[in-house]
Image: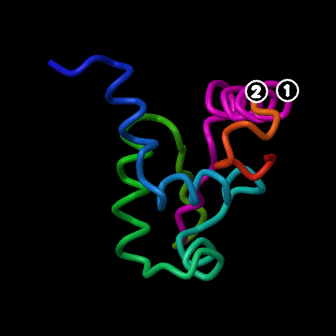
């Protein structure tokens, strides 16, 4: 049986899912908006969003005919803020892989 950590982090191991999370950090969006911004076909986005939704990383609300996706503000936004803080104070240009280096 997979550990909860393995399940959670495997959801974040996809570049597409990370791109979705990064985009949704700015504002809630529907699949069409995400598709335009990320330049990814809607079917791929829908599949990735379903995985994120299953783990409650994103939430979805129906607005008319559109589904609007947003990040889980209670747990995921604080995690992202912690990662940003870590990169700013502890990465210090040593890893060479993050944007802050």
Who's the residue at 33% across and 26% down the image? 6
Q: 19 left or right of 22?
A: left
The label on residue 46 is none
Who's the residue at 85% across and 26% down the image? 89
Asked if labels 1 and 2 touch by Cβ distance under 8 angstroms, the answer is: yes
Q: Is residue 17 above or below residue 83?
A: below
Who's the residue at 47% across and 35% down the image? 56
Q: Could you say which is closer to the camera, residue 68 or residue 5?
A: 5
Q: Secondary structure at mark 2?
A: helix
Q: Position of residue 82 (x, y in %)?
A: 74, 26
Q: Which residues are magenta?
A: 66-90
Q: Look at mark 1 in the image and give the residue it sits on.
A: 89
Q: CA distance from mark 2 to mark 1?
A: 5 Å
Q: Dot 2, crowdedness within 10 Å: few (<14), some or many (≥20)? A: few
**Is most of the magenta stretch helix, strand or loop?**
helix
Q: 27 left or right of 12?
A: right
Query: Magenta span has 39?
Result: no
Q: Look at mark 2 in the image and give the residue it sits on.
A: 86
Who's the residue at 52% across and 73% down the image? 65
Q: Position of residue 98 (x, y in %)?
A: 69, 48
């Amino acid at each position: 049986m997979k550990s909860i950590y393995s399940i959670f982090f495997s959801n974040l191991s996809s570049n597409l899912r990370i791109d979705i999370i990064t985009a949704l950090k700015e504002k809630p969006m529907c699949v069409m908006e995400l598709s335009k911004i990320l330049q990814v076909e809607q079917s791929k986005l829908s599949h990735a969003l379903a995985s994120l939704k299953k783990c409650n990383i994103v939430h979805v609300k129906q607005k008319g005919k559109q589904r609007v996706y947003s990040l889980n503000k209670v747990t995921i936004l604080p995690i992202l803020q912690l990662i940003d803080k870590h990169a700013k104070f502890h990465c210090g240009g040593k890893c060479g892989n993050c944007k802050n280096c």
